[in-house]
Image (spheres, rainbow, N blue to C red):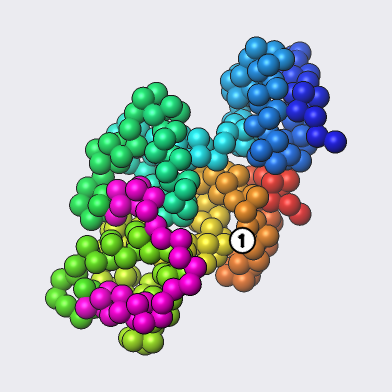
Amino acid sequence: MFDPKADADVLKNAMKGAGSDKEAIINLASSRTNSQRLQIRDAYKAAYGKDLIADFKSELSGHLKDTLVAMFYHPVDYDCLSLRAAMKGLGTDEDTLIEIMATRPGYMIKQMMERYPIVVEGRNLEDDIKNDTSGSFRRLLISLLQGSRSDNINPDVEECEKMAKELYEAGEKKWGCDDSVFNKIFALRSPMEIGCISRAYHKLTGHTILQAINNEFSGDFKKLLIAVVYAVISPSEYFATKVNKAVKGLGTNDKLLIRILVTRNEIDMKYIKQYYKQLYKKDMIEDIKADTSGEYRKLLVKIVGE
């Protein structure tokens, strides 16, 4: 039976003395849901007057610490911190902005807008995005940030065909693309509607809307449009490609790997693994094992599930 106070005691005892009992911490954290971990964090503060995440940061190190910290945040707060990190200092991590803003449902984005000033010390998410981005890329991000996407699950086929035609006439058919039409449709239409529009576009043109976007646009705006469509039509497949991006080649993009595994663990990890196998003819867990080591690897493997 789940007992947050008992779990808090286990974690406290595991961080006592000269060295932390990392095995105990890994086993406990990986066997609890995010909701349970948040209760443990509250119980820890009530019992010991200290923040569990602060103690992780003090007692642990490296990517093991980073993963555990991510696991004990509410998903919305973790997204807020990830967005701020992507925009803080010189330069912008556009890929992180794209991944989060393109894939989160409207209700989560609205929660982000509310939580961001609390989590990152009075800052405004929309202002930060405006200050760190520009052009069509910025406009689509700001549109997505309003969290106004429709939740219609029964799209009108004729309406979808009309919008597919609008996209064709605003993109492939004309000299110079009208990105405002793409912005409006992909920021406001529901996942079911976008799927319907995509099918109508293929019927109209003989190729996919993703191919059209890839041919007609460039830069971060193109990446964001593709992510919006891809993540709506096949989210698990999209995240499988992100895991592969994190582990392929020399070095590992640990921030990306941790974020995907932690945020998708309770949503669709089973299907991400299936798509990974289908796309790359390799086992996702084996690729993660090959690219990581030590307790960090143990925790990631437990998150993904053998």
Q: Quadrant of residue 244?
A: bottom right
Q: Nearer the viewer, residue 78 or 305?
A: 78
Q: In the orientation shown, which residue stands out farthest toward the right?
A: 1
Which secondary structure, mark 1? Answer: helix
Is 71 in the magenta?
no
Q: Is residue 207 at least partly visible in the picture? A: no
The residue at the point 46 percent across, 40 percent down is 111
- Relative to 178, 6 lies left or right: right
Prevailing secondary structure class for the magenta stretch in the rendered image? helix
Q: Nearer the viewer, residue 75 or 98?
A: 75
Q: Is residue 157 at least partly visible in the picture? A: yes
Q: Where is residue 175 in the image (x, y as percent from the top left)?
A: 14, 76
Q: Nearer the viewer, residue 139 or 305?
A: 139
The number of numbered badges drawn on the structure is 1
- Relative to 44, 9 lies left or right: right
Q: Give the range drawn in magenta.
A: 140-169
The residue at the point 65 percent across, 18 percent down is 45
Q: Position of residue 85 (x, y in %)?
A: 41, 35
Q: Quadrant of residue 262?
A: top right
Q: Image height check: is 111 above or below 135?
A: above
Q: Quadrant of residue 120?
A: top left
Q: Name the residue under label 1.
A: 272
- Tell me which amino acid carries mark 1: Ile
